[in-house]
Image (cartoon, grey):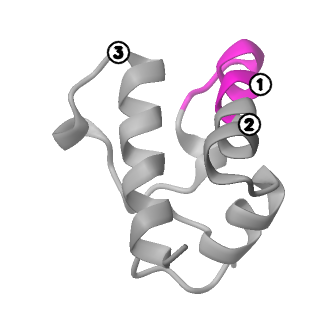
Amino acid sequence: MTREQISDFCVTALANILRISRDRVDTGTKFDRLGLDWAMLVYLMMEFEEKLDLHPMVAFQLHGPISGKAGKTT
């Protein structure tokens, strides 16, 4: 799966979880600054594992911000 596909999945999943439109998801924001509560975060992690067959921490570490252009986690 490409970085862009993971990014697109993240935007869609976050928009659904936060109940906002996709265009309101700030793709430059790191996951820890999105305002997710524990239940939302658990749901997002389950989505990663189920739909992407990817451990969520791998995606968080590889991509930092949601943006597919992000490459660093610092």
Q: Nearer the viewer, residue 72 or 56?
A: 56
Direction from residue 2 to residue 44 in the image, left or right: right
Q: Residue at x 82, y 54 (%)?
A: 55
Q: Which residue is mark 1?
A: 42
Circle 3 SS class: loop
Instruction: Quadrant for the C terminus, please.
Output: bottom right
- Mark carried by residue 45: 2
Q: Look at label 2 and name its amino acid.
A: Met
Residue numbers of the magenta segment: 35-44
In the displayed structure, 9 sits above or below 58; it is: above
Residue 20, located in which quarter of the rendered image? Answer: top left
Q: Calculate the distance from the C-alpha at mark 2 to the C-alpha at mark 1.
A: 5 Å
42 to the left or right of 34: right
Type of residue at label 1?
Answer: Val
Element assignment for label 1: helix
Q: Is residue 39 magenta?
A: yes
Q: Residue at x 58, y 43 (%)?
A: 33
Q: Check the picture and name the quadrant holding the N terminus.
A: bottom right
Q: Secondary structure under badge 2?
A: helix
Give the prevailing secondary structure in the magenta stretch. Answer: helix
Q: Which mark is residue 19?
A: 3
Q: In the rendered structure, which disc, 1 or 3, sits on the residue that comes first in sequence? A: 3
Q: Position of residue 21 (x, y in %)?
A: 21, 28
Quarter of the image where one finds residue 5: bottom left
Residue 45, horizontal then vertical, whole percent = 74, 36
Density class for disc 2 (Cα within 10 Å; few <14, some 14-19, many ≥20) is some
Task: Please indicate whether residue 68 sits to the left or right of residue 47 in the image.
Answer: left
